[in-house]
């Protein structure tokens, strides 16, 4: 994402925090498809994903006043809000149905047995933010298959079917995305 887009998105979020609906429209136009893709990958249902997207942007409207540009990039903040809201949405739906949770969501929702120290939690959180921020800088055609693979455990063949693209294209996009992630994160690994 260019600096112009980043500063534009930052201003839109600040506008939302001030009650400006046009800021929300702009953010929705830019991020709704990414949020929907995330919701579909977790919820596996178009209707539920659409409902979750609406809840995410409602939540963005409510929480925009708490956004601090110095703490995170706008895309990172938006996708973090989306992730938390979609997981909450999934949990609330799971409680109201008798369906068994999908294995990848059970992994996501499971609390680790081993208690991490405060330092380990801070380092883990920092590293996760770095990876998420770097992922948001990738073109969507590269970040989407990486996300589906790393966070949801889908194979490259499954991703090709989900995205309706050739397997070779998935492999190429993932390889290019990983190269860009590696380059973006190398300065932090010493």
Image (cartoon, rainbow, N blue to C red):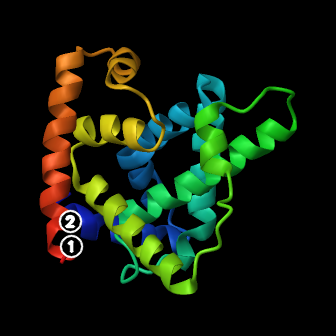
Query: x and y percent of residue 164 in the render?
Result: 33, 14
Side (left or right) of 114 relative to 136: right
- Rendering coords of residue 110 (x, y %): 68, 52
Q: For the residue labelled by badge 1, is the local secondary structure a helix, a strand or a loop?
A: loop
Residues at badges 2 and 1 in contact (C-beta under 8 Å)?
yes
CA distance separating discs 2 and 1: 7 Å
| Above or below: residue 168 compared with residue 90 | above
Horizontally, residue 88 falls left or right of residue 130, namely right
Q: Is residue 153 above or below residue 20?
A: above
* Tally of numbered discs: 2
Q: Residue at x 17, y 19 (%)?
A: 168
Disc number placed over residue 189 in the picture, else none: 1
Q: Which residue is mark 2?
A: 185
Residues 156 and 139: in front is 156
Q: Around disc 1, counting alpha carbons within 10 Å, would you say few (fewer than 14), some (14 to 19), or many (20 or more)?
A: few
Q: Write the residue at 48% across / 38% down.
A: 152
Nearer the observer, 65 or 43: 43
**Label 2 vs label 1, nearer the camera:** 1
Q: Quadrant of residue 74?
A: bottom left
Question: Which quadrant, please, contains the N terminus?
Answer: bottom left
Residue, x 16% and y 38% (percent of image)? 175
Percent coordinates x, y for residue 28 in the rendering: 45, 48
Q: Position of residue 182 (x, y in %)?
A: 17, 57
Left or right of 21? Residue 158 is left
Does residue 58 appear anywhere in the picture?
A: yes
Q: Which mark is residue 60?
A: none
């Amino acid at each position: 994402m260019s600096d112009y887009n980043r500063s534009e998105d930052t201003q839109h979020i600040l506008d939302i925090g001030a009650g400006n609906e046009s800021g929300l429209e702009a953010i929705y136009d830019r991020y709704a498809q990414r949020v929907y893709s995330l919701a579909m990958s977790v919820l596996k249902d178009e209707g539920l994903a659409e409902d979750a997207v609406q809840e995410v942007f409602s939540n963005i409207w409510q929480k925009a006043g708490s956004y601090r540009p110095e703490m995170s990039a706008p895309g990172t903040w938006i996708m973090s809000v989306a992730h938390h809201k979609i997981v909450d949405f999934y949990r609330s739906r799971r409680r109201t149905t008798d369906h068994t949770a999908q294995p990848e969501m059970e992994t996501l929702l499971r609390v680790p047995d081993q208690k991490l120290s405060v330092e380990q939690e801070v380092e883990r959180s920092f590293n996760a933010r770095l990876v998420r921020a770097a992922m948001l800088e990738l073109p969507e055609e590269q970040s989407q298959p990486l996300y589906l693979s790393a966070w949801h455990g889908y194979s490259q063949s499954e991703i090709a079917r989900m995205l309706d693209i050739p397997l070779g294209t998935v492999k190429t996009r993932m390889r290019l995305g990983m190269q860009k992630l590696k380059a973006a994160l190398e300065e932090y690994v010493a």
